[in-house]
Each structure stands twice: as structure tokens, then as C-alpha cells.
Image: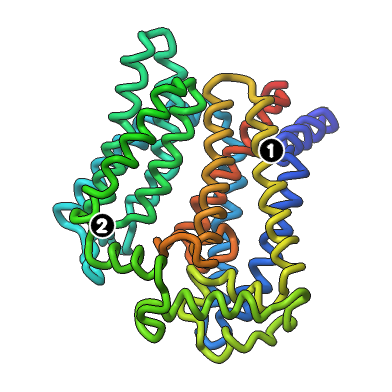
Amino acid sequence: MRSSISSSMFGQVGKLLYLDKTLLALLLSLLVASTLTMYSAAYDFPGRFALHLRNITVAVSIMIVIANIPPTILMRFGPYLYGTGVLLLLAVDLFGTIKKGSQRWLHIGFEFQPSELMKIATPLMLAWYFHTYSDIRRTRLFVVAGGLLLVPVLMILKQPDLGTSILVFAAGFYIIFLAGLPWRVLITMAGTALLTAPFMWPMLHDYQRDRILTLLNPEADPMGKGFQIRQAIIAIGSGGLAGKGWMEGTQGHLGFVPERSTDMVLSVFSEEFGLAGIVALLLLFSFLIVRGTQISIGAATLYSRLLAAAMSMIIFTYVFVNIAMVSGMAPVVGIPLPFLTYGGTALVTICTACGILLGVHREACGVIVGKR
């Protein structure tokens, strides 16, 4: 009898720990790179490295919890999470804390940025919507989905927070596109965006216009608005083929690169590990995205398939935009590099996305606690 109980308990624990080994190995490798890079980048920020380790611990713990929640349960909470997020965004507009000209935070005993919640809540909502209402007229289906996406995006843009609004839009748009958005609609949307772009210029905030102008000509104000991006590019180039060595970067350690532990952390990594390190890092991210795509292809339901694909593409968007930003190919919009950038909220968001991927894989393998 006792042997039977022990066997059952170990069986349940085994199912709880049944996680995709390939994805976990890639995540572990990225977290090792993150730890090494942050130790160097934050050497003169007392306590930041310890906080980064704490953030990793919290984010990975949340990832494991999410991984053990069946996607069918996540699906039930999608609309409630989305509705709560929209209400919190409204509360930010009414009562939010203002910092550096932006109203993005709520103070509820601690400071909380509700827009970060929408990076996960929006795709959860849209995946639930397409799974639940796939039999209604396609025109109405996509019009309603577009409305559900634009509500949080426009509310976040108003704060203003261009970087987060881009990520929320991308997360939702991937769901809509993968649900079967017709190409003619996509082409029409792209054409409309290009034609209306000149008319959007006066609507941009001053700092947003400055960032675009700095991208086009960073030498116009090399010691002012163009300083950050110029120094980041210098740091990337100075790493050469093999890098200067861990903790040996001069651009970062001498303080030439602003935000070297946050948005510009890639420049520190590149200076110390060189082209070889950048290639290895890009391969890790590429394998992670490919593995996520494979998980989405093998998903058990339409909901899981859409959600897993969106999570993979969210990671791709983070990586692509941050690298383009740091290397001077896109305006600086404050989008972090997954795992490497300092910041608890962004790390939790990325690890939540990875937890969803792990949960979809478990569902596809038939591993559900209490049932096989």
C-alpha cells in the first residue's frame, strides 16, 4: 500500500517536472550569458547584480508555475485578464504616477506598470476569441479582433510609451495574422500605413521626432542626442572578432555607454565577447524561436497553436527590435533584450511566454497532472 502511494506521488512529481529539455537547455544557456554580462555591465551599480539574480529567480519560478498550468485553464482566464488590464490602463490615465513626462505607473503599495500585463493578456484574449468564435463571418471576426487589439495599444500610446505599444501590437497582430488574416487585407493595411506616415509626423511627441532624426543623422548632435547610439556602435565595433575579454570592456567600464545595463546591454556583451559571442548569442535566440515554432506546430488545439506561435514571435520581436536599435538601424524605443537586460518586469514577461510554450508542449505530450 505504502509502495503504491509513493509510486503515485513520484508519478505526479514527474509529470510536474516533465518539461521540454531542448527549450530548457536554451533558456539555461541564455541565463548564463545574462549573469556574466550583467555582472560586468552593472559593476559600478551597487546591488544591481544581486537584484538581477533575484529577478531571474522570481521569473524562472513563475515560468515553472505557468508551465504546469494546462492551456485549457489559461484559456478560461484570458478574457478576465484582458478586461482587468484595460481597467488598470484606465486607472493609469486617471490616477497614474508621472515620471519624466510619462504617465505609465500605478502606485499600489509598490509601483506597477499595467501596460506590461497587456503583452501577455492581449494574445491570451485574442487566441481565446478565435478559438471560441471561429464559426462566425470572417469579416466580422477580424474587425472585432482588430478592435480588441487597438484598445490597449492606443491607451498605451497615450501614456506615452511607444516601445510597449509596439510589443503589445505585435503580440496581438501575430495572433490575428496566424488565424488567417487575408493577404489582401494585410497589403492594404501596409499601403495605408505608408501613405499616412507623413501625416503622423506632427502627432509625434518631441522626443519621438528627435529619436527618428537622430537615427537618420546621429552626427548632427554627436555629444547630445546622438551620443548614446554612437557610443553603443563604437563599443560593438571595438570588440572585434573575439572580444576584449570578460570584464575588460573599456567603453562600458569607463562609462561611455549610457544605459549599459538596460537597453544598451548588447553593446557591453559585444565589446567583451566580440563577433564570435554575438553569433553564438544570435544562434541561441534563433534556436529558441525555432523550438517555440515547432511546439506551436505540434500543439493539440487551435488555441494552443495560436498562443504558442505568438509567444515565439514576441521573443523574436524583442530580439529583432533591440538589436536593430543598439546597432543604429532603428530608433531607440526602450525595448529590452530578452534575459540580458536588467529589469524585473520584462524578464517576468519573457519567462511567462516561455512558460506558456512549455505548457503547450506538455499538453501536446498528454502530460497533465492526474491524467495521462
Q: Which residue type carries mark 2?
A: Pro
Query: For the N terminus, which image quadrant?
Result: top right
In the rendered image, the vertical position of residue 126 relative to residue 301, given as above or below: below
Please name the residue shown 44% across and 13% down the image: 134
Q: Which residue type carries mark 1?
A: Leu
Q: Residue under circle 2?
A: 160
Q: Residue under circle 1?
A: 16
In the rendered image, the vertical position of residue 24 relative to residue 10, given as above or below: below
In the rendered image, the vertical position of residue 142 relative to residue 204, given as above or below: above
Report if residue 181 is visible in the image: no
Query: For the C terminus, which image quadrant?
Result: top right
Q: Residue 150 or 110: which is nearer the viewer?
A: 150
Please name the residue shown 77% across and 44% down the image: 22
Please name the residue shown 51% across and 80% down the image: 231
Q: Quadrant of residue 331?
A: bottom left
Task: Count the labels in the image.
Answer: 2
